Image (tube, rainbow, N blue to C red):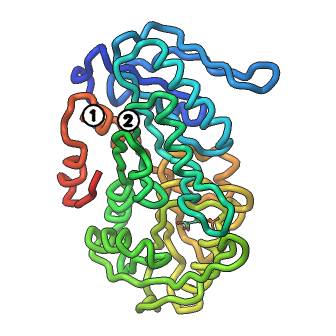
Amino acid sequence: MARTFQGDVHDDLRLFAGNANPELAKEIAMTLGVELGRISISPFPNSETRVQIEESIRGTDVYILQPTCQPANDNLMELLLTIDAMKRASVRQITAVIPYFGYGRQDKKSTGREPISAKLVADLLTVAGANRIVAVDLHVAQIQGFFDIPADHLTALTTLADHFKQKQIDNGVIIAPDAGRVKLAEKYSNILGFPLALMHKRRSGEGGREVEAAGVVGDVAGKNPIVVDDEIATGGTVLEQVAVLEEAGAKPAYISVTHPVLAGAAPERLRHPAIREVVVTNTIPVPAEKQASGKIEVLSIAPLLAEAILRIHQHRSVSQVFSAQQLVFPV
Ligand code: R5P
């Protein structure tokens, strides 16, 4: 039976949801044994966003759940306006729980005269009035340092790895999709006891947007590969990777990613026969029409977020959630 925290939660913890992922917020509320706060978020006739908090929250610790996934700008604006409304309603503390942190891919200049959007979004959240943020698997861990407020960085790694443990896959191999994800792949390899192989990724085109999986280093022939990454956006990268793995004699691949962005042609691309299963979490909702491939397994991140919220609220260690699972993760 799923673990719940009913009875542990005090009246001064309030959880609210924006429109980006209300189902996840409901699951977290149920796990915590709280009611979701009453809030109305709707467009003005001129397309601006109107936010109204419909209950008193004076003196409370509020948590607002809102991934800044598609439509990214609307969801971000909802989050900023809600934080502003909360601040002006005299709360004690505002925590923005952002399971998927949009604009995270723009964490540095890749050509001249570009913004560093991740830094700007961090600043906007702080100026709006957030006292703390909670995020899951940021695109790069250093985004945590873009915030001048505490930023608790969680990982879905154990949620995903546990799924593969239960599948009891024989002859597996963990695939790091590029040099930047070797550490992540090593953690999977330690948990699942599979060897590691590394893909060589070449970027080209403006801002390095064209990705080519140029080869794989390590023994994959006849094995069951598990490709690990933070997100699938358009699915282009995954398609390149599974083609290289197939060419190297691997069996159809499992894909393990935290964030199912699934933009554009991604749902269609996942139909490729060299992909066996795509395991994701519900940091971003996966509507039925994006399940086209029938290969997407969605795991819930609600238990992890509920536990993190409760620990933050009770001033208890959050990193202990992971150390209890034998994972060293610097929250
Ligand atoms: C890249 O650095 C990321 O970790 C993912 O591999 C990338 O975001 C996937 O993008 P797409 O699915 O559009 O190829």
Q: Which mark is residue 312?
A: 1
Task: Tell me the SS state at disc 2.
Answer: strand
Number of marks drawn: 2
User: Under tag 1, what secondary structure?
Assistant: helix
Figure check: 169 above or below 123? below
Quadrant for ligand 1 reads bottom right
Query: Which residue lies under the disc numbered 2?
Result: 132
Q: Dot 2, crowdedness within 10 Å: few (<14), some or many (≥20)? A: many
Label located before the other in sequence (2 or 1)? 2
Give the percent coordinates (x, y) of residue 224. Answer: 44, 79
From the top left corner, tell me how far across and down residue 56 is, in percent: 44, 7
* Disc 2 and disc 1 in contact, CB within 8 angstroms: yes
Query: Which residue lies at the image location 46% right of the left edge and 28% below the top edge?
Result: 129
Q: Residue furthest right?
A: 46
Q: Amino acid at mark 2?
A: Arg
Res. 5 image quadrant: top left
Residue 1 seen: no
Residue 55 visible in image: yes
What amino acid does circle 1 point to?
A: Ile
Report the residue at 60% width, 47% height from top: 286
